[in-house]
Amino acid sequence: MGTLVSVNVGLPKDVAWHGRTVYTGVWKQPVDGPVLLRRLNLDGDGQGDLAGHGGEQRAVLVYQLDSYRHWAQELGRDDLTPGNFGENFTVDGLPDDEVCIGDRYRVGDAVVEVTQPRVTCYRVGLRMNEPRLPALLVAHRRPGFYLRVLTEGLVRAGDEFVKLSTGPEAMTVAELDALLYLPGHPRDGAARALRIPALSPGWQASMRALLEQSDGQRGNAGLTATAAPPAWPGFRPLTVTAYAEETRDVFSLHLAAADGTPLPPARPGQFLTLRLPAPDGPLIRSYSLSGPPGDAAYRISVKQEPHGLGSAYLRANVRPGTVVEAAAPRGTFTLEPGDGPVLLLSAGIGVTPVLAMLYALADQRSTREVWWVHGARDGAEHAFAAESRELVGRLPHGHALVCYSRPGPGDRAGRDYTTAGRVTADVLRELRLPPDTAAYLCGPAAFTTQVTAALGELGLAAVHSELFGSQPGITPGIAAAPDRPPHPPDGPPGPGPAVSFVRSGLTVPWRPEYGSLLELAEACDVPVRWSCRTGVCHTCESGLLSGQVAYTPEPVDAPAEGSVLICCSQPAGEVALDV
Protein backbone atom coordinates (compact mmCIF):
# COMPACT_ATOMS: atom_id res chain seq x y z
CA MET A 1 0.00 0.00 0.00
CA GLY A 2 2.85 2.41 0.64
CA THR A 3 6.43 2.91 1.70
CA LEU A 4 7.82 5.15 4.41
CA VAL A 5 10.33 7.25 2.47
CA SER A 6 11.41 9.61 5.25
CA VAL A 7 10.86 10.04 9.00
CA ASN A 8 10.91 13.74 9.92
CA VAL A 9 11.03 15.34 13.35
CA GLY A 10 11.52 18.78 14.81
CA LEU A 11 10.99 20.55 18.11
CA PRO A 12 9.09 23.84 18.36
CA LYS A 13 11.06 27.05 17.99
CA ASP A 14 10.48 30.79 17.75
CA VAL A 15 10.24 32.13 14.20
CA ALA A 16 10.04 35.79 13.20
CA TRP A 17 6.97 36.57 11.07
CA HIS A 18 5.52 39.97 10.09
CA GLY A 19 7.03 41.69 13.10
CA ARG A 20 5.77 39.02 15.51
CA THR A 21 7.13 35.80 16.95
CA VAL A 22 5.53 32.46 16.12
CA TYR A 23 6.21 29.40 18.25
CA THR A 24 5.93 26.47 15.88
CA GLY A 25 7.10 22.92 15.27
CA VAL A 26 6.35 22.97 11.53
CA TRP A 27 10.05 22.79 10.63
CA LYS A 28 10.78 19.05 10.32
CA GLN A 29 14.04 17.41 9.27
CA PRO A 30 14.65 13.82 8.08
CA VAL A 31 16.38 11.50 10.54
CA ASP A 32 18.39 8.37 9.79
CA GLY A 33 17.89 5.04 11.44
CA PRO A 34 15.09 3.75 13.67
CA VAL A 35 12.90 6.19 15.64
CA LEU A 36 10.57 5.18 18.45
CA LEU A 37 6.96 6.04 17.65
CA ARG A 38 5.15 6.65 20.93
CA ARG A 39 1.50 7.24 21.69
CA LEU A 40 1.81 11.06 21.44
CA ASN A 41 4.85 11.61 19.25
CA LEU A 42 7.93 10.38 17.54
CA ASP A 43 11.00 10.69 19.71
CA GLY A 44 12.57 14.06 19.03
CA ASP A 45 9.38 15.63 17.69
CA GLY A 46 7.02 18.23 19.12
CA GLN A 47 4.29 20.73 18.29
CA GLY A 48 4.06 24.37 19.24
CA ASP A 49 0.27 24.61 19.33
CA LEU A 50 -1.34 21.56 20.90
CA ALA A 51 -4.81 23.02 20.40
CA GLY A 52 -4.49 22.43 16.66
CA HIS A 53 -1.80 19.80 16.28
CA GLY A 54 -0.39 16.82 18.14
CA GLY A 55 -1.97 14.80 20.91
CA GLU A 56 -3.24 11.24 20.78
CA GLN A 57 -5.53 11.78 17.77
CA ARG A 58 -2.85 13.64 15.77
CA ALA A 59 0.35 11.93 16.81
CA VAL A 60 1.78 11.63 13.28
CA LEU A 61 1.19 13.72 10.16
CA VAL A 62 1.53 11.93 6.81
CA TYR A 63 2.17 13.50 3.40
CA GLN A 64 2.78 11.88 0.04
CA LEU A 65 5.57 12.08 -2.54
CA ASP A 66 2.94 12.35 -5.26
CA SER A 67 1.69 15.57 -3.66
CA TYR A 68 5.28 16.85 -3.52
CA ARG A 69 5.49 16.31 -7.28
CA HIS A 70 2.12 18.02 -7.75
CA TRP A 71 3.14 21.12 -5.81
CA ALA A 72 6.57 21.30 -7.45
CA GLN A 73 4.78 21.70 -10.78
CA GLU A 74 1.89 23.82 -9.50
CA LEU A 75 4.05 26.29 -7.57
CA GLY A 76 7.11 26.15 -9.84
CA ARG A 77 9.31 24.87 -7.02
CA ASP A 78 12.45 22.74 -7.36
CA ASP A 79 13.54 23.01 -3.73
CA LEU A 80 11.04 20.71 -2.01
CA THR A 81 12.45 18.07 0.32
CA PRO A 82 10.86 15.66 2.85
CA GLY A 83 9.44 17.45 5.88
CA ASN A 84 8.74 20.70 4.01
CA PHE A 85 4.98 20.34 4.52
CA GLY A 86 5.43 19.79 8.26
CA GLU A 87 4.81 16.04 7.98
CA ASN A 88 6.39 13.36 10.14
CA PHE A 89 6.05 10.60 7.55
CA THR A 90 6.83 11.27 3.89
CA VAL A 91 5.38 8.30 2.03
CA ASP A 92 5.31 6.82 -1.43
CA GLY A 93 1.70 5.77 -2.03
CA LEU A 94 -1.19 6.16 0.45
CA PRO A 95 -2.96 8.90 -1.57
CA ASP A 96 -5.64 10.99 0.13
CA ASP A 97 -8.29 9.80 -2.33
CA GLU A 98 -7.67 6.14 -1.43
CA VAL A 99 -6.74 6.08 2.26
CA CYS A 100 -9.87 5.95 4.45
CA ILE A 101 -10.61 7.26 7.91
CA GLY A 102 -10.30 4.30 10.27
CA ASP A 103 -7.83 2.37 8.10
CA ARG A 104 -5.25 0.53 10.17
CA TYR A 105 -1.66 -0.20 9.13
CA ARG A 106 1.42 -1.85 10.48
CA VAL A 107 4.57 0.15 9.78
CA GLY A 108 7.82 -1.13 11.26
CA ASP A 109 6.99 -2.36 14.75
CA ALA A 110 4.09 0.08 15.21
CA VAL A 111 0.37 -0.14 14.44
CA VAL A 112 -1.41 3.07 13.47
CA GLU A 113 -4.93 4.24 12.57
CA VAL A 114 -6.07 7.10 10.32
CA THR A 115 -8.10 9.63 12.35
CA GLN A 116 -8.61 12.83 10.29
CA PRO A 117 -7.26 15.06 7.49
CA ARG A 118 -4.65 17.71 8.17
CA VAL A 119 -5.98 20.81 9.95
CA THR A 120 -5.85 23.99 7.89
CA CYS A 121 -3.25 26.31 9.41
CA TYR A 122 -1.22 29.31 8.28
CA ARG A 123 2.01 27.78 9.54
CA VAL A 124 2.42 25.41 6.60
CA GLY A 125 2.24 28.52 4.40
CA LEU A 126 4.81 30.18 6.67
CA ARG A 127 7.12 27.17 6.34
CA MET A 128 6.78 27.10 2.55
CA ASN A 129 6.78 30.91 2.10
CA GLU A 130 3.44 30.50 0.31
CA PRO A 131 0.57 32.17 2.25
CA ARG A 132 -2.08 30.66 -0.07
CA LEU A 133 -1.07 27.10 0.77
CA PRO A 134 -3.72 26.32 3.45
CA ALA A 135 -6.44 27.09 0.89
CA LEU A 136 -4.63 25.31 -1.93
CA LEU A 137 -4.26 22.08 0.08
CA VAL A 138 -8.05 21.98 0.44
CA ALA A 139 -8.96 23.20 -3.05
CA HIS A 140 -6.62 20.68 -4.70
CA ARG A 141 -7.85 17.94 -2.33
CA ARG A 142 -4.35 17.08 -1.12
CA PRO A 143 -4.46 17.73 2.64
CA GLY A 144 -2.50 14.76 4.04
CA PHE A 145 -3.72 13.01 7.18
CA TYR A 146 -3.06 12.22 10.83
CA LEU A 147 -2.46 8.90 12.53
CA ARG A 148 -3.24 7.61 16.00
CA VAL A 149 -0.73 5.14 17.47
CA LEU A 150 -2.35 1.89 18.56
CA THR A 151 0.90 0.02 19.22
CA GLU A 152 4.14 1.82 19.93
CA GLY A 153 7.25 0.67 18.11
CA LEU A 154 10.31 1.52 16.08
CA VAL A 155 9.90 2.89 12.56
CA ARG A 156 12.45 3.84 9.93
CA ALA A 157 12.71 4.97 6.32
CA GLY A 158 12.12 2.02 4.01
CA ASP A 159 9.44 0.36 6.16
CA GLU A 160 6.39 -0.82 4.26
CA PHE A 161 2.84 0.10 5.28
CA VAL A 162 0.90 -3.15 5.59
CA LYS A 163 -2.85 -2.62 5.63
CA LEU A 164 -4.56 -4.49 8.47
CA SER A 165 -8.15 -3.31 8.00
CA THR A 166 -10.32 -0.76 6.18
CA GLY A 167 -12.25 1.82 8.12
CA PRO A 168 -16.03 1.41 8.29
CA GLU A 169 -17.91 3.45 5.66
CA ALA A 170 -14.76 3.52 3.47
CA MET A 171 -14.71 7.35 3.55
CA THR A 172 -11.48 8.65 2.10
CA VAL A 173 -9.37 11.42 3.59
CA ALA A 174 -10.04 13.63 0.56
CA GLU A 175 -13.79 12.97 0.78
CA LEU A 176 -13.97 13.91 4.45
CA ASP A 177 -11.81 17.00 3.95
CA ALA A 178 -14.08 18.20 1.14
CA LEU A 179 -17.17 17.45 3.21
CA LEU A 180 -16.05 19.91 5.88
CA TYR A 181 -14.23 22.61 3.93
CA LEU A 182 -15.74 22.73 0.42
CA PRO A 183 -19.27 23.94 -0.43
CA GLY A 184 -22.16 21.51 -0.15
CA HIS A 185 -21.80 19.59 3.13
CA PRO A 186 -24.28 16.80 2.32
CA ARG A 187 -26.03 15.50 5.41
CA ASP A 188 -25.69 11.87 4.38
CA GLY A 189 -21.93 12.37 4.23
CA ALA A 190 -21.85 13.81 7.75
CA ALA A 191 -23.97 10.89 8.97
CA ARG A 192 -21.56 8.43 7.35
CA ALA A 193 -18.57 10.12 8.97
CA LEU A 194 -20.19 9.88 12.40
CA ARG A 195 -20.42 6.12 12.00
CA ILE A 196 -16.61 5.87 11.94
CA PRO A 197 -15.37 5.22 15.51
CA ALA A 198 -11.81 6.26 14.65
CA LEU A 199 -12.83 9.79 13.59
CA SER A 200 -11.22 12.26 16.00
CA PRO A 201 -13.53 14.02 18.52
CA GLY A 202 -13.04 17.46 16.97
CA TRP A 203 -14.12 16.27 13.55
CA GLN A 204 -17.02 14.36 15.11
CA ALA A 205 -18.26 17.65 16.60
CA SER A 206 -17.98 19.32 13.20
CA MET A 207 -19.94 16.53 11.53
CA ARG A 208 -22.68 16.74 14.16
CA ALA A 209 -22.95 20.48 13.59
CA LEU A 210 -23.26 19.97 9.82
CA LEU A 211 -25.92 17.32 10.41
CA GLU A 212 -27.94 19.75 12.55
CA GLN A 213 -27.60 22.76 10.21
CA SER A 214 -30.96 23.97 8.90
CA ASP A 215 -31.86 23.26 5.28
CA GLY A 216 -30.93 26.12 2.99
CA GLN A 217 -28.97 27.96 5.68
CA ARG A 218 -25.78 29.52 4.35
CA GLY A 219 -22.52 29.20 6.20
CA ASN A 220 -20.48 26.32 7.52
CA ALA A 221 -21.77 25.11 10.88
CA GLY A 222 -18.97 22.56 10.98
CA LEU A 223 -16.41 25.33 11.34
CA THR A 224 -18.23 28.09 13.25
CA ALA A 225 -21.56 28.76 14.91
CA THR A 226 -24.19 29.87 12.42
CA ALA A 227 -27.50 31.67 12.77
CA ALA A 228 -30.46 32.53 10.58
CA PRO A 229 -29.79 35.41 8.17
CA PRO A 230 -30.38 38.90 9.59
CA ALA A 231 -33.97 40.07 9.22
CA TRP A 232 -32.91 43.19 7.26
CA PRO A 233 -29.69 44.47 5.71
CA GLY A 234 -27.73 47.34 7.24
CA PHE A 235 -29.50 49.83 9.49
CA ARG A 236 -33.17 50.89 9.55
CA PRO A 237 -34.98 53.54 11.62
CA LEU A 238 -36.80 52.41 14.77
CA THR A 239 -38.86 54.62 17.07
CA VAL A 240 -38.40 54.68 20.82
CA THR A 241 -41.81 54.01 22.37
CA ALA A 242 -40.83 53.85 26.06
CA TYR A 243 -37.93 54.62 28.39
CA ALA A 244 -37.59 52.99 31.82
CA GLU A 245 -35.04 53.35 34.63
CA GLU A 246 -34.31 49.85 35.96
CA THR A 247 -31.63 50.75 38.55
CA ARG A 248 -29.49 53.80 39.18
CA ASP A 249 -27.21 52.86 36.26
CA VAL A 250 -29.35 50.57 34.06
CA PHE A 251 -32.16 51.76 31.80
CA SER A 252 -34.30 50.16 29.09
CA LEU A 253 -35.54 51.38 25.73
CA HIS A 254 -38.52 49.95 23.88
CA LEU A 255 -38.19 50.18 20.10
CA ALA A 256 -40.83 49.71 17.40
CA ALA A 257 -41.22 50.13 13.67
CA ALA A 258 -42.23 53.67 12.71
CA ASP A 259 -45.32 52.40 10.88
CA GLY A 260 -46.43 50.21 13.77
CA THR A 261 -45.93 46.90 11.95
CA PRO A 262 -44.52 44.07 14.09
CA LEU A 263 -40.76 43.75 14.07
CA PRO A 264 -39.25 40.41 13.02
CA PRO A 265 -38.94 38.09 16.03
CA ALA A 266 -35.54 37.84 17.65
CA ARG A 267 -34.13 34.68 19.16
CA PRO A 268 -33.74 34.72 22.96
CA GLY A 269 -30.20 35.86 23.74
CA GLN A 270 -29.56 37.99 20.66
CA PHE A 271 -28.44 41.64 20.59
CA LEU A 272 -29.32 44.80 18.68
CA THR A 273 -26.78 47.22 17.21
CA LEU A 274 -27.52 50.97 17.16
CA ARG A 275 -25.88 53.69 15.10
CA LEU A 276 -25.89 56.94 17.05
CA PRO A 277 -24.92 60.46 15.91
CA ALA A 278 -21.74 61.97 17.33
CA PRO A 279 -19.58 65.01 16.46
CA ASP A 280 -16.63 62.90 15.28
CA GLY A 281 -18.70 60.40 13.33
CA PRO A 282 -21.34 57.81 14.23
CA LEU A 283 -21.10 55.76 17.40
CA ILE A 284 -22.02 52.13 16.75
CA ARG A 285 -22.84 50.10 19.85
CA SER A 286 -24.53 46.76 20.56
CA TYR A 287 -26.96 46.03 23.40
CA SER A 288 -28.68 42.78 24.39
CA LEU A 289 -32.39 42.33 23.85
CA SER A 290 -33.96 41.75 27.25
CA GLY A 291 -37.68 41.45 26.57
CA PRO A 292 -39.98 38.64 25.42
CA PRO A 293 -38.51 37.29 22.16
CA GLY A 294 -41.87 37.14 20.34
CA ASP A 295 -42.95 40.72 21.04
CA ALA A 296 -43.89 43.02 18.16
CA ALA A 297 -41.38 45.56 19.58
CA TYR A 298 -37.87 45.19 20.98
CA ARG A 299 -36.53 46.05 24.43
CA ILE A 300 -32.85 46.69 24.96
CA SER A 301 -31.31 47.32 28.36
CA VAL A 302 -28.23 49.46 28.80
CA LYS A 303 -25.79 49.99 31.64
CA GLN A 304 -24.31 53.48 31.75
CA GLU A 305 -20.60 53.00 32.14
CA PRO A 306 -18.45 55.80 33.61
CA HIS A 307 -16.81 56.54 30.25
CA GLY A 308 -19.36 54.92 27.95
CA LEU A 309 -20.08 57.32 25.08
CA GLY A 310 -22.96 55.29 23.67
CA SER A 311 -24.75 54.73 26.96
CA ALA A 312 -24.25 58.37 27.96
CA TYR A 313 -25.73 59.56 24.67
CA LEU A 314 -28.76 57.30 24.99
CA ARG A 315 -29.48 58.29 28.57
CA ALA A 316 -29.17 62.00 27.87
CA ASN A 317 -30.88 62.25 24.49
CA VAL A 318 -33.28 59.39 23.84
CA ARG A 319 -36.88 59.50 24.98
CA PRO A 320 -40.22 58.29 23.55
CA GLY A 321 -40.56 59.53 19.99
CA THR A 322 -36.82 59.57 19.27
CA VAL A 323 -35.82 57.74 16.09
CA VAL A 324 -32.65 55.63 16.17
CA GLU A 325 -30.96 53.52 13.51
CA ALA A 326 -30.72 49.80 14.26
CA ALA A 327 -29.27 46.74 12.58
CA ALA A 328 -31.24 43.50 12.73
CA PRO A 329 -30.94 41.24 15.78
CA ARG A 330 -27.76 39.17 15.72
CA GLY A 331 -25.86 36.64 17.75
CA THR A 332 -25.42 32.90 18.20
CA PHE A 333 -25.66 32.97 22.02
CA THR A 334 -29.24 31.77 21.91
CA LEU A 335 -31.43 29.35 23.83
CA GLU A 336 -31.51 26.01 22.06
CA PRO A 337 -34.70 23.94 21.96
CA GLY A 338 -34.91 20.77 24.00
CA ASP A 339 -36.42 19.23 27.09
CA GLY A 340 -33.32 18.86 29.28
CA PRO A 341 -32.46 20.97 32.33
CA VAL A 342 -31.30 24.57 31.85
CA LEU A 343 -29.05 26.83 33.93
CA LEU A 344 -29.36 30.59 33.27
CA LEU A 345 -26.43 32.21 35.04
CA SER A 346 -25.45 35.88 35.07
CA ALA A 347 -23.76 38.69 36.93
CA GLY A 348 -24.50 42.42 36.72
CA ILE A 349 -25.72 43.64 33.34
CA GLY A 350 -25.02 40.16 31.99
CA VAL A 351 -28.57 39.43 33.10
CA THR A 352 -30.04 40.91 29.91
CA PRO A 353 -29.61 38.08 27.33
CA VAL A 354 -30.46 35.31 29.79
CA LEU A 355 -33.53 37.28 30.91
CA ALA A 356 -34.80 37.01 27.32
CA MET A 357 -34.20 33.26 27.55
CA LEU A 358 -36.15 33.14 30.84
CA TYR A 359 -39.01 34.97 29.12
CA ALA A 360 -39.01 32.39 26.33
CA LEU A 361 -39.17 29.49 28.80
CA ALA A 362 -41.88 31.14 30.90
CA ASP A 363 -43.99 32.04 27.86
CA GLN A 364 -43.83 28.40 26.76
CA ARG A 365 -44.76 27.23 30.25
CA SER A 366 -41.73 25.00 29.86
CA THR A 367 -41.66 21.84 31.95
CA ARG A 368 -37.85 21.78 31.89
CA GLU A 369 -35.91 22.07 35.12
CA VAL A 370 -34.70 25.68 35.07
CA TRP A 371 -32.19 27.21 37.47
CA TRP A 372 -31.99 31.02 37.54
CA VAL A 373 -28.74 32.10 39.20
CA HIS A 374 -27.75 35.77 39.36
CA GLY A 375 -25.09 37.78 41.14
CA ALA A 376 -25.33 41.49 42.00
CA ARG A 377 -23.67 43.86 44.41
CA ASP A 378 -26.89 44.66 46.31
CA GLY A 379 -30.58 45.33 45.83
CA ALA A 380 -29.97 48.81 44.45
CA GLU A 381 -27.94 47.30 41.58
CA HIS A 382 -30.14 44.24 41.07
CA ALA A 383 -31.80 44.93 37.72
CA PHE A 384 -35.06 43.12 36.87
CA ALA A 385 -35.36 41.60 40.35
CA ALA A 386 -39.17 41.55 40.48
CA GLU A 387 -39.46 40.70 36.79
CA SER A 388 -37.20 37.65 36.99
CA ARG A 389 -38.85 36.50 40.23
CA GLU A 390 -42.28 36.56 38.53
CA LEU A 391 -40.99 34.67 35.49
CA VAL A 392 -39.35 31.93 37.57
CA GLY A 393 -42.63 31.61 39.49
CA ARG A 394 -44.43 30.80 36.23
CA LEU A 395 -42.24 27.76 35.64
CA PRO A 396 -43.46 24.48 37.18
CA HIS A 397 -39.85 23.41 37.77
CA GLY A 398 -38.19 26.79 38.24
CA HIS A 399 -35.52 27.45 40.88
CA ALA A 400 -33.90 30.77 41.75
CA LEU A 401 -30.67 31.58 43.56
CA VAL A 402 -29.56 35.21 43.92
CA CYS A 403 -26.22 36.20 45.44
CA TYR A 404 -25.50 39.72 46.74
CA SER A 405 -21.78 40.33 47.23
CA ARG A 406 -22.45 43.30 49.57
CA PRO A 407 -26.10 43.37 50.70
CA GLY A 408 -27.38 46.84 51.52
CA PRO A 409 -28.95 47.82 54.85
CA GLY A 410 -32.44 47.31 53.48
CA ASP A 411 -31.75 44.02 51.71
CA ARG A 412 -33.27 40.99 53.37
CA ALA A 413 -32.05 37.40 52.94
CA GLY A 414 -34.86 35.14 51.80
CA ARG A 415 -36.79 38.04 50.31
CA ASP A 416 -34.35 39.98 48.14
CA TYR A 417 -31.51 37.49 47.83
CA THR A 418 -30.68 33.88 48.67
CA THR A 419 -27.14 34.11 49.97
CA ALA A 420 -24.51 36.74 50.68
CA GLY A 421 -21.32 36.47 48.62
CA ARG A 422 -20.46 35.84 45.01
CA VAL A 423 -21.46 33.06 42.64
CA THR A 424 -18.69 30.52 43.24
CA ALA A 425 -17.95 26.89 42.47
CA ASP A 426 -19.19 25.95 45.95
CA VAL A 427 -22.49 27.78 45.38
CA LEU A 428 -22.97 25.99 42.06
CA ARG A 429 -22.02 22.62 43.53
CA GLU A 430 -24.84 22.91 46.06
CA LEU A 431 -27.37 23.10 43.21
CA ARG A 432 -26.59 19.46 42.31
CA LEU A 433 -27.07 20.13 38.63
CA PRO A 434 -27.63 17.07 36.42
CA PRO A 435 -24.69 16.49 34.03
CA ASP A 436 -26.95 17.01 31.00
CA THR A 437 -27.77 20.58 32.09
CA ALA A 438 -27.34 23.16 29.33
CA ALA A 439 -25.72 26.22 30.91
CA TYR A 440 -25.99 29.77 29.51
CA LEU A 441 -23.88 32.38 31.24
CA CYS A 442 -23.13 36.04 30.73
CA GLY A 443 -21.22 38.55 32.79
CA PRO A 444 -17.82 40.21 33.19
CA ALA A 445 -14.86 38.42 31.61
CA ALA A 446 -13.33 37.25 34.92
CA PHE A 447 -16.70 35.97 36.13
CA THR A 448 -17.30 34.09 32.88
CA THR A 449 -13.86 32.47 32.95
CA GLN A 450 -14.15 31.35 36.58
CA VAL A 451 -17.70 30.07 36.28
CA THR A 452 -17.00 28.23 33.03
CA ALA A 453 -14.15 26.38 34.74
CA ALA A 454 -16.37 25.61 37.74
CA LEU A 455 -19.12 24.19 35.54
CA GLY A 456 -16.57 22.04 33.73
CA GLU A 457 -15.43 20.63 37.06
CA LEU A 458 -19.06 19.80 37.84
CA GLY A 459 -19.22 17.70 34.66
CA LEU A 460 -21.45 19.97 32.56
CA ALA A 461 -20.55 19.50 28.91
CA ALA A 462 -22.87 22.07 27.30
CA VAL A 463 -21.70 25.49 28.52
CA HIS A 464 -22.57 28.50 26.36
CA SER A 465 -21.27 31.95 27.22
CA GLU A 466 -21.45 35.53 25.98
CA LEU A 467 -19.05 38.36 26.66
CA PHE A 468 -19.92 42.03 26.24
CA GLY A 469 -17.24 43.88 24.36
CA SER A 470 -14.41 42.26 22.44
CA GLN A 471 -14.13 38.49 22.29
CA PRO A 472 -10.84 36.88 23.38
CA GLY A 473 -8.44 36.64 20.48
CA ILE A 474 -7.38 33.42 18.77
CA THR A 475 -3.88 33.90 17.33
CA PRO A 476 -2.33 30.41 17.16
CA GLY A 477 1.34 30.22 17.97
CA ILE A 478 1.78 33.98 18.41
CA ALA A 479 3.73 34.99 21.49
CA ALA A 480 1.68 36.99 23.97
CA ALA A 481 2.07 40.77 23.73
CA PRO A 482 1.19 43.43 26.30
CA ASP A 483 -2.49 44.31 26.20
CA ARG A 484 -3.23 47.62 24.52
CA PRO A 485 -6.68 49.16 24.13
CA PRO A 486 -7.83 49.37 20.51
CA HIS A 487 -6.51 52.49 18.80
CA PRO A 488 -6.17 53.99 15.31
CA PRO A 489 -3.22 52.55 13.36
CA ASP A 490 0.08 54.36 13.37
CA GLY A 491 0.57 56.94 10.65
CA PRO A 492 -1.76 59.41 8.96
CA PRO A 493 -5.44 58.49 8.50
CA GLY A 494 -6.15 56.46 5.40
CA PRO A 495 -8.08 57.79 2.40
CA GLY A 496 -10.56 54.91 2.31
CA PRO A 497 -14.03 54.29 3.73
CA ALA A 498 -14.76 54.08 7.44
CA VAL A 499 -14.36 50.67 9.08
CA SER A 500 -16.13 50.27 12.41
CA PHE A 501 -15.04 47.56 14.86
CA VAL A 502 -18.21 47.69 16.92
CA ARG A 503 -17.32 45.50 19.91
CA SER A 504 -14.06 47.41 20.27
CA GLY A 505 -15.73 50.84 19.96
CA LEU A 506 -13.35 51.97 17.22
CA THR A 507 -13.95 53.47 13.76
CA VAL A 508 -10.99 54.16 11.47
CA PRO A 509 -10.56 54.93 7.75
CA TRP A 510 -9.31 52.14 5.51
CA ARG A 511 -5.78 52.27 4.11
CA PRO A 512 -5.08 50.33 0.88
CA GLU A 513 -1.72 49.05 2.12
CA TYR A 514 -3.54 46.67 4.44
CA GLY A 515 -4.18 43.43 2.62
CA SER A 516 -7.33 42.60 4.56
CA LEU A 517 -9.69 43.77 7.27
CA LEU A 518 -7.85 41.37 9.57
CA GLU A 519 -4.57 43.18 8.96
CA LEU A 520 -6.22 46.54 9.71
CA ALA A 521 -7.68 45.13 12.94
CA GLU A 522 -4.26 43.84 13.97
CA ALA A 523 -2.71 47.27 13.31
CA CYS A 524 -5.34 48.71 15.68
CA ASP A 525 -4.77 46.06 18.39
CA VAL A 526 -8.38 44.97 18.00
CA PRO A 527 -8.69 41.42 19.40
CA VAL A 528 -9.08 39.06 16.45
CA ARG A 529 -9.58 35.35 15.83
CA TRP A 530 -7.92 33.54 12.94
CA SER A 531 -6.00 30.44 11.90
CA CYS A 532 -5.57 29.97 8.14
CA ARG A 533 -5.61 33.63 6.94
CA THR A 534 -6.69 32.46 3.47
CA GLY A 535 -10.47 31.93 3.68
CA VAL A 536 -10.61 28.25 4.62
CA CYS A 537 -11.06 27.67 8.35
CA HIS A 538 -13.74 30.35 9.12
CA THR A 539 -12.15 31.08 12.51
CA CYS A 540 -12.20 34.77 11.56
CA GLU A 541 -15.87 34.78 10.50
CA SER A 542 -17.54 37.86 11.97
CA GLY A 543 -20.86 39.65 11.69
CA LEU A 544 -21.10 42.17 8.86
CA LEU A 545 -23.56 44.63 10.38
CA SER A 546 -23.60 46.94 7.39
CA GLY A 547 -21.75 47.53 4.14
CA GLN A 548 -20.17 45.33 1.49
CA VAL A 549 -16.76 43.70 1.08
CA ALA A 550 -14.64 42.34 -1.74
CA TYR A 551 -12.66 39.13 -1.37
CA THR A 552 -9.04 38.52 -2.39
CA PRO A 553 -8.68 35.57 -2.56
CA GLU A 554 -12.23 34.23 -2.75
CA PRO A 555 -13.13 32.04 0.24
CA VAL A 556 -13.08 28.30 -0.33
CA ASP A 557 -16.63 28.20 1.13
CA ALA A 558 -18.79 31.31 1.56
CA PRO A 559 -19.56 32.58 5.08
CA ALA A 560 -23.09 32.74 6.47
CA GLU A 561 -25.37 35.45 5.16
CA GLY A 562 -24.67 38.66 7.04
CA SER A 563 -21.15 37.53 7.94
CA VAL A 564 -17.68 38.11 6.54
CA LEU A 565 -14.30 36.39 6.55
CA ILE A 566 -12.06 39.26 7.61
CA CYS A 567 -8.84 37.39 6.78
CA CYS A 568 -9.31 37.73 3.02
CA SER A 569 -11.68 40.68 2.55
CA GLN A 570 -11.40 44.41 1.97
CA PRO A 571 -14.16 47.03 2.38
CA ALA A 572 -16.07 48.04 -0.76
CA GLY A 573 -17.47 51.06 1.14
CA GLU A 574 -18.20 51.92 4.75
CA VAL A 575 -18.54 48.76 6.83
CA ALA A 576 -19.49 47.94 10.42
CA LEU A 577 -18.11 44.69 11.83
CA ASP A 578 -19.13 42.81 14.96
CA VAL A 579 -15.49 42.70 16.09
Image: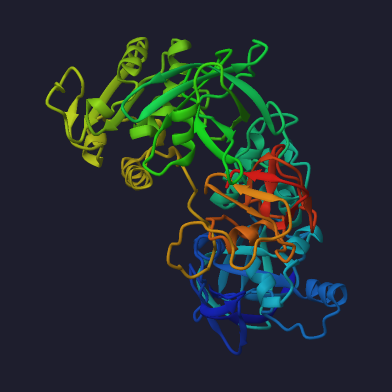
Q: Nearer the viewer, residue 164 or 142?
A: 142
Above or below, 77 against 498 in this view is below
Q: Quadrant of residue 526?
A: bottom right
The residue lying at 66 percent from left, 74 percent from top is 126
Q: How is the image coloured?
A: rainbow
Residue 492 sits in which quadrant?
bottom right
Say left or right for 75 vs 340.
right
Drawn side of residue 140 relative to residue 34, left or right: right
Q: Is residue 569 above or below residue 68?
A: above
Can I make out residue 194 in this image? no
Residue 458, percent from left and from top: 31, 40
Q: Position of residue 56 (x, y in %)?
A: 50, 62
Total residue callouts: 0
Q: Write the residue at 35% across / 15% down.
A: 387
Q: Nearer the viewer, residue 120 or 30?
A: 120
Residue shown at 52% from the left, 79% from the top? 14
